Image: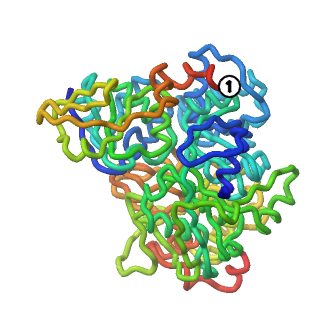
Amino acid sequence: MKVHKYGDNIDTDVIIPARYLNSSALSHLAEHCMEDADKDFAKTVRKGDFIVGGENFGCGSSREHAPLAIKACGVKAVIAKSFARIFYRNAINIGLSIVVCPEAVDRINDGDELDIDFDSGVITDITTGEKFSGDAFPPFIRSIIEKGGLLNNIDSFI
Amino acid sequence: MGYTITEKLLMKAAEKSAIKTGDLIVGKLDMVLGNDITSPVAIAELNSHGIDKVFDKDKIAIVLDHFAPNKDIKSAEQCATCRNFAKKHSITHFYDVGKMGVEHALLPELGIVKPGDVIIGADSHTCTYGAIAAFSTGVGSTDMALGMATGKCWFRVPSQVKIDLIGKPSPYVSGKDVILHLIGLIGVDGALYKTIEFGGDGIKYLTIDDRFTICNMAVECGAKNGIFPFDEVTEEYAKDKNYDYEVFSSDEDAVYEKVITINLSDLKPTVAFPNLPSNTRTLPFDEEIKVDQVYIGSCTNGRLSDIAAACGILKGRKIADGVRLIVIPATQKVYLECVKLGYVETIINAGGVVSTPTCGACLGGHMGILASKEVCVSTTNRNFVGRMGASDSKVYLASPLVAAATAIEGKLVSPEKYMGSDIKEQK
């Protein structure tokens, strides 16, 4: 599915502006997702699309509304050179797939068709035919993602 | 090999005798914090997983500070969700309108967070409490939910960066200038996933409020936490609080990935230009930047000393025509002191407004939203696109002294020429 590509330091204020934080309803968050970075995103995004960002994706506030908004839009994965730490853990905790792969970010173009195999970590740019390998998660984090989020994993914390 | 204060606090939380950078650990928490934006998401998570118990009603703090007093019906519903949850679980540290303040000013003020604690908060500026030699870091709502249910959180042990502060700052250089300088130096991801630990001979010149401001903005360079050592300044602060606490300190042979030295005597009033906190320049600069609004408040700079510093400049003066000055004391206690000490009168006589504690304007919520193309000089912590309002409005981050001088002149200026002996005294 299609790539929506952005630059470095995409912050949570542009992913979901605070003026919309008076509700955490997923449809409301999806409607305004990426609004201050790309006002057409919510209209053009399709289920299974990808967001590709540069360094420090998701910097700024701790609002889980940011990964929730992206997930609610049906985005399959966010691929970036690096993620801000709270966004990184929030994405893992809610089961939004995120992949660190600087090489892919440099080579993938906005609008390319993309696919990702989560088992092997291989990202395929269908438009160009190039393949990339994302960083693997440590087992502890993989188990959170595989169970569909942190609270499904609560037994390991008790 | 020795350990840093952060590593020791994480070892305490994880009940381990050894850890290393990159380890994934599960730690026990002394406090779990949330606000009216992040708590409802956490509460919904608990509900959807059928979790109906909290681990300790005394170790959870819920502060209704962001869109409270409620700005609209949806915000009111979010606050109601928090209120009902707090009542149901008899949450001790629940703060509603009348008692609430901006969370990161309120919790230290009330002694709810203390030296030696390990704290998470579903608010990115939770890193503020490093100022009092605690480990504290911002997390999301799901972490808050797990924290409320189990008293635990997962952490990746961060690498350690030391910021060696030497020299003595001039009277018109504050904690805000120190942290803006650092962020300008290393960038908004310059300490991504890392600890920034402050130390050096210069820290004795930094008040506890300077340290709160500095640690508050550690997240703006990507850091997991910012932390100061426990010293005479911390001890003096803690002795007025009615709590027992534990002191942790870094070993002489602790290992740091990097040491950055900053000479405080070289620093000048520093301003972060739109649209990144790292986009810093020092005053004075040639360019004339006219402002529509000046905002003094927030978890970064809404404490009594911040408002006192601003009032040192505002006293007996009028703000420039066409400028709106909005001052928001961070807590009810700060507000009351501002009334008693005459600061409210000073601000009103200068042409400004003073209003109830809230985070509102800082994040473009309410109480000071910017229209298209408007310019604001703000003592807050972020100046991203659209942060305080319209996506083409502009926010310049600065200290309360710079903000006050700017309100008088209607353009961004250095506070230096306003610095009389009385102001030095107040600072």
**Number of numbered markers:** 1
Please give the name of the residue rendered at 49% of the width and 72% of the height, measured from the top-left corner.
B270
Please give the name of the residue rendered at 66% of the width and 64% of the height, measured from the top-left corner.
B253
Please give the name of the residue rendered at 70% of the width and 48% of the height, measured from the top-left corner.
B9
Q: Quadrant of the C terminus of chain A?
A: top right
Q: What chain letter is assigned to the residue under label 1?
A: B
Q: Quadrant of the N terminus of chain A?
A: top left
Residue B65 visible? The answer is yes
Q: Judge left or right: residue B39 versus residue B323.
A: right
Q: Judge left or right: residue A145 versus residue A77.
A: right
Q: Is residue B412 above or below residue A12?
A: below
Residue B322 visible? The answer is no
The image shows residue A9 at horizontal and vertical percentages of 36, 50
* Residue B5 image-quadrant placement: bottom right
The image shows residue B106 at horizontal and vertical percentages of 71, 49
* Residue B417 image-quadrant placement: bottom right
Q: Is residue B368 above or below residue B400?
A: above
The image shows residue B111 at horizontal and vertical percentages of 79, 49
- Between B16 and B331, the residue placed more toward the observer is B16
Q: Judge left or right: residue A128 versus residue B380.
A: left
The image shows residue B49 at horizontal and vertical percentages of 58, 16
Dot 1 corresponds to which residue? Answer: B149
- Between B26 and B107, the residue placed more toward the observer is B26
Please give the name of the residue rendered at 62% of the width and 28% of the height, measured from the top-left corner.
B146
- Between A38 and B22, the residue placed more toward the observer is B22
Q: How is the image coloured?
A: rainbow
Query: What amino acid is labelled 1 in the image?
Result: Ala
